[in-house]
Image: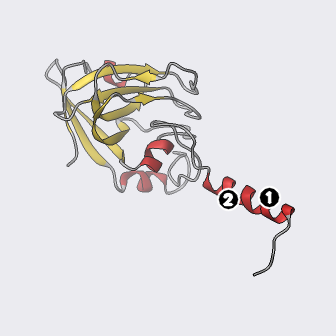
C-alpha cells in the first residue's frame, strides 16, 4: 500500500467531510440533493406525487382536513426535512415519524419556506401547534409542549386556515 503524504490525507479528509455533510441540523432541517425541491423543475409534479401519503385531520369545526405528505422516518430524512426548498405545494407537507413519544425540537436552518408544525402523540391527538419562521436557527427552537411521536409540517398558516386546533385528531398513514 502506498503511503500518503500530509496533503493527501488532508485532501481525502476534506472529500469525506464534504460528501458526508447532508445536513448537520436536527429534525426539520435538511439539505441539497433533493430531486423534488423546486416546484418549477420539469417532472417535479410527477416526482412529488409519487410516494406521497395521506393524512386526514378531524378538525374541531367538523371539517376533514387532508394533506398529501412525504414521510421522514429515518434520521437522514429527518435532518434533511424541507431544507433548501423554495416552495411547498398546496395541501402538501412532511410527516416526521419517531420511534416513540418524546419531547421534539425542530429548527429552521436553511429552510426557506415559513412553516406551521403540528406535534402529534401516538394516539393521533394534536398536542401542540406552532408557527415557524423561515431560516430561524437561533435557539430556542420549536419545542413540543408535550411528548409527541409525530411532527407534521405544512405551509405557514395551514392549520389555522383550516380550523385545526390542539386536541383535534389525525389519521396517519400506517
Image depth: mark 1 or mark 2 in front: 1
Asked whether disc 1 touches disc 2, contact meaning CB atoms under 8 Å apart, the reply is no
Label 1 sits on residue? 10
Residue 117: image x %, image y %?
37, 27
Residue 32: image x %, image y %?
59, 48
The residue located at (42%, 28%) in the rendering is 105
Q: Is residue 12 left or right of residue 44?
A: right
What's the distance in space between the residues labelled 1 and 2, CA to CA?
10 Å
Q: Quadrant of residue 135?
A: top right
Q: Is residue 49 left or right of residue 127?
A: right
The residue located at (32%, 27%) in the rendering is 118
Tell me the SS state at disc 1: helix
Q: Residues within 10 Å of mark 1 (few under 14, many from 20)?
A: few
The residue located at (53%, 29%) in the rendering is 108
Q: Is residue 30 above or below residue 112?
A: below
The residue located at (34%, 33%) in the rendering is 151
Q: Quadrant of residue 62?
A: top left
Q: If the image is split into quadrants, where does the N terminus sit? A: bottom right
Label 2 sits on residue? 16
Q: Is residue 144 left or right of residue 6?
A: left
Out of 162 and 14, give the one closest to the viewer: 14
Out of 77 and 154, give the one closest to the viewer: 77
Amino acid at each position: 500500500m502506498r503511503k500518503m503524504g500530509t496533503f493527501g490525507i488532508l485532501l481525502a479528509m476534506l472529500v469525506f467531510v464534504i460528501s458526508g455533510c447532508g445536513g448537520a441540523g436536527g429534525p426539520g432541517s435538511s439539505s441539497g440533493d433533493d430531486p423534488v425541491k423546486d416546484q418549477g423543475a420539469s417532472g417535479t409534479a410527477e416526482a412529488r406525487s409519487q410516494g406521497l401519503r395521506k393524512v386526514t385531520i378531524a378538525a374541531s369545526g367538523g371539517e376533514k382536513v387532508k394533506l398529501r405528505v412525504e414521510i421522514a422516518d429515518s434520521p437522514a430524512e429527518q435532518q434533511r426535512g424541507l431544507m433548501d426548498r423554495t416552495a411547498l405545494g398546496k395541501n402538501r407537507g412532511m410527516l416526521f415519524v419517531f420511534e416513540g413519544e418524546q419531547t421534539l425540537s425542530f429548527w429552521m436552518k436553511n429552510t426557506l419556506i415559513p412553516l406551521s408544525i403540528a406535534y402529534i402523540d401516538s394516539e393521533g391527538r394534536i398536542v401542540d401547534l406552532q408557527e415557524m419562521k423561515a431560516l430561524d436557527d437561533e435557539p430556542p427552537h420549536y419545542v413540543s409542549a408535550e411528548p409527541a411521536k409525530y411532527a407534521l409540517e405544512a405551509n405557514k398558516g395551514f392549520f389555522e386556515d383550516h380550523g385545526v386546533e390542539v386536541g383535534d385528531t389525525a389519521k396517519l398513514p400506517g
